[in-house]
Amino acid sequence: MPICTTCTTTLPFLYTIYESEHNLRLEQCRKCAQLQRDQPLENKSQSCFADPYVEHDSLMLLLDLMLLKRAVFRHLLYNRGTEPRRSIAGVLVDPPPDSWNKRELTRWFTILRFGGPLVCIDAFIRWSYLNPHQPSDISPWTPQTINTLFRTLVGVSIGNPSIREFSNTANISLETIAFHGAVIVGCFLVLGLADKLRHAPISDSDIRREFRFSLIPLTLFYSSLTKLFLLFLLTIWRPSSEPVPLPFDVQLFKDENIDREWVVRNVLGGMSAGFGLRVILDTHPLFTTTIIIAGWMAKTAVSQLYTLNGELARLALLARLTFSAISRSELSMGHHDLPQGNCDRLGNLSPTATVPQLLPGMPEATVEQAVYTSLGPHAFIYRPTDSQLSYDQEAIDGDPTVIILFGWMAAKRAHLLKYTEAYRKLYPAATIIVVRSHISFFSASWAKLAERFNPVLDVLKALGCFQGRQRILTHSFSNGLAFVLQVFTLINSTGGSFHMMAFNRLLASQPKLTGSTPVPATALIIDSSPGGFSIPHIALAMVSPIQNKIMRLFARIISIVYLFLVFLVRGVVLRQAHPFQQMLTMLRRPSLLPWLDVNGQTPRLYFYSKRDAMVPWKEVEQHINECEQDRLNVRKVRFEDSPHVAHARMYPDEYWSAVKQLWVDAQGSVKSL
């Protein structure tokens, strides 16, 4: 039955037609009229029509939908297509009762008719980000762009790095199905839970009695118009390449720190969808928010599942192509005599070069004299050229040949490059691999997170790191952990130790260096770790990338509440071991990484500070004492007033002197075996 768009009272009909289709009279809602009579004269409205949108055209409906007016949602969902009362030969004839099957069939047909074009529009908007600088004199409809548009629509992974900054998803149809399916399931569960939580039997409202599950996808499509309209505007008026500086310093709202497409699609789109669900569910906003979050999680999971495989395959192929010449050659301890011809050409690839350009028969990739080569969004590598290898032969023979850095969470590339440049001066012939830590790791499982390191693993295999052919110095910054639950996920990916745990699982199948295998010199540096595993310290680490103090305080409060609930569920409900305890146990293993000495002779160096607000120095010393009890070869350097992962900046001489001495000790440990 139709309803009043103001008070949701059910009515037998909305308007009466007299003789002609253009001669009609709107029906008034008796409940609204009664309430208006009780109001003071100055508060009375001009009419109490049950549904004024009967007389409005489609343009007015579209505008009100984008403005998220509740009345237009009720008109389209409940009243659209209902039969009017007719005047036949002066006799008023009420409309026949609606057939439930007919109404449901009509509604599902509307979903297909309305949802299909919206999915195509969304696919076109995302596709437009793939060609942001298309020349105006060239047609955009080439076979390649049409194929990309089709793959974007049907949900095939593209793996193009140019869309990585635009939410890295290109599977519209699959995302839509996942989001709508999760929301429908969430509505079913929430409505059942709400009914059970009622303390006393309460009669359902009219809008609740008219609820059908077919209303959910139709509501989601209607509420997405605002999101799609704003996204379409972003494709026309893109952000300026030269942002206008603000009169005051608000780092959080800088243009380079804001992904407008993500904000509009997820934040504004989620709010619009939640508003639409409030119209049909007639329940508390907390329930609708929970449903939307569940739908968003399902959509994100599907997006990562179908796009990550394509991206990882591209990155792995790039790594294999880059280091194929190395893997075919016989690697020696001092890799300065490696054949540099083809490797240097591929090693100096521009980060914008794509895999198809490297395949036979395709145009040669763009080459620039860059020192660092990207191994995907979370890793890059430096390889020395002939000029860097023209140092004293005796000095090079004792230096590390491979240096692996595991960065802290949200570390900027410029900050990590300060460490790589220092290592380039200390050990000019070393290959340096940097693995970055990103806040997006919080949503990755162990398996998916390990897969992201496959390009780095290919490089390590090609360099012979697992066969004892390289001298490796491993440098890790800060803490980190990721442990995924089925329902509740706790992720605090704050740095290198976490990445070493992921590598440990990933490299479990690699051959370990046994006692009979000649062990080259290896060393391990752990900077500002481990420790700080209490909820306040974890929350502080999670919000550390936020520059604005007010926003950081607000985000920290939310993080503390979230972590408390997750720890409560994990420890009390699931009764699982504390994930940080697992990390501490793993760090005490002599063979933490495959290239480390299994007998614990690999020297370790711990840097920490009394002023570190994220990792208390006493917790680090407790871990060091436990390692000494396990007879590990441990060294430590404690600073007095350097902040978290800032020891090298404040005490550069002491820091790098300790690093050099560590490597000297590593060489001595090998000679003593």
Image (cartoon, rainbow, N blue to C red):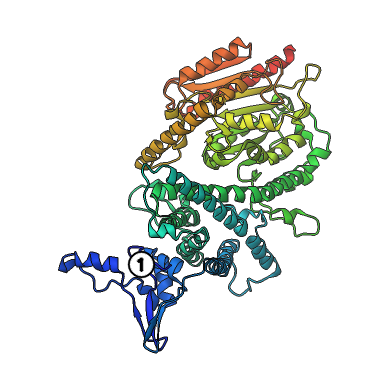
Reply above or below: 536 against 70: above
Residue at x 39%, y 73% (from the top left corner): 13
Type of the residue with mark 1: Cys
Q: Residue at x 44, y 31 (%)?
A: 564
Q: Where is residue 72 in the image (x, y as percent from the top left)?
A: 40, 68
Figure quadrant of the C terminus: top right
Of 182 and 311, the residue lying toward us: 182
Which residue is depicted at the point 34% across and 77% down? 26
User: Which residue is label 1 attached to?
Assistant: 4
Residue 383 visible, this orientation: no
Name the side, left or right, on which 115 lies relative to 375.
left
Crowding at dot 1, Cα within 10 Å, few <14 / some 14-19 / many 20+, comes out as many
Q: Where, by quadrant of the figure, is residue 421 drawn?
A: top right
- Secondary structure at numbered mark 1: loop
Please identify the quarter of the rendering in which residue 20 is found.
bottom left
Residue 651 spot, x, y in % from top left:
48, 25
Whether residue 6 is visible, yes or no, is: yes
Q: Is residue 331 left or right of residue 210?
A: right
Asked whether 655 or 577 is in front, the reply is 577
